[in-house]
Image: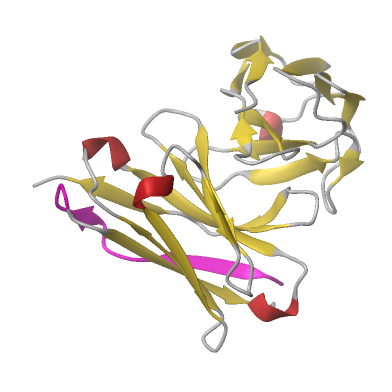
Amino acid sequence: DIQMTQSPSSLSASVGDRVTITCRASQTISTYLNWYQQIPGKAPKLLIYGASWLQSGVPSRLSGSGSGTDFTLTIESLQAEDFATYYCQQSYSTPYTFGQGTKLEIK
Amino acid sequence: QVQLQESGPGLVKPSQTLSLTCTVSGASISSGPYYWSWIRQLPGKGLEWIGYIYYTGRTDYNPSLKSRITMSVDTSKNQFSVNLRSVTAADTAMYFCARVGKDGHSDYWGLGTQVTVSS
């Protein structure tokens, strides 16, 4: 299985800040990397697919980049609704695997 | 708007079979090119991909669960299902169904259903 490692595991930030979450794959996955946001008690929500393609309806202050093994999710100008847990997922090969999550908290 | 809804018992006894169904509305399971998947989230933990099924019945399961899992699809009801046999407390989780795009991303999710394994 491909292992996905996110960093940091948790992050404190303020409204208006710019934050970056990283995700590393244990082997190359090209750009088969997806990012999800999960609010407690809710289902995950797709934010970015194919490493950098913004899902319809997702604000443009979110962006993704990377290829191969190293990827980043960047959120510009944090808003209150951004405080949640973020997961990366590789869909290069099955079993699809997720990172352990990054919890973004209000400072 | 595509919607998915999980259904099934919230409580299953150890060693029994967990059976869940996902009903899809707003899209036809049999129209392709999407796969239909199950994902679970253990209490306070991250996400685990269980497997997916295509409307033709083609499946791909997580090897960690493969010996206990069967997925099926009912195109007449626009539903797909999962059976997980011989459950233990370790299978207690929130179970989600989701639609999978051609590049493997899950763009629509059900709300999830909590399943507890306990006697």
- Say which of A24 and A61 sits in front: A24
Q: Is residue A86 above or below residue B10?
A: above
Horizontal and vertical percent position of residue A50: 85, 40
Q: Nearer the viewer, residue A96 or B114?
A: A96
Q: Is residue B23 magenta?
A: no
Q: Residue at x 29, y 42 (%)?
A: B92
Residue B12 falls within the magenta-colored stretch: yes
Q: Residue at x 64, y 12 (%)?
A: A11
The total number of labels drawn is 0
Q: Residue at x 70, y 17 (%)?
A: A26
- Quadrant position of residue B93: top left
Task: Using the rendered view, name the quadrant where residue B58 is placed.
Answer: bottom right
Whole-percent x, y for residue A3 in the image: 62, 22
- From the viewer's perspective, tell me whether residue B78 is left or right of residue B102: left
Rendered position, A89 above or below A17: below
Q: Where is residue B29? Give x, y as percent.
A: 65, 76
Is residue A97 left or right of B94 when viewed as pictured?
Answer: right
Instruction: Please give the range of residues in magenta.
Output: B1-15
Q: Residue at x 65, y 10 (%)?
A: A8
Depicted A54 relative to depicted A97: above or below? below
Whether residue A65 is visible here, answered yes or no, is yes
Establish if A95 lies above or below B25: above
Q: Is A81 on the left or on the right of B21, as rendered?
A: right
**Outermost residue, front side:** B67
Residue B28: tell me if it is visible: no
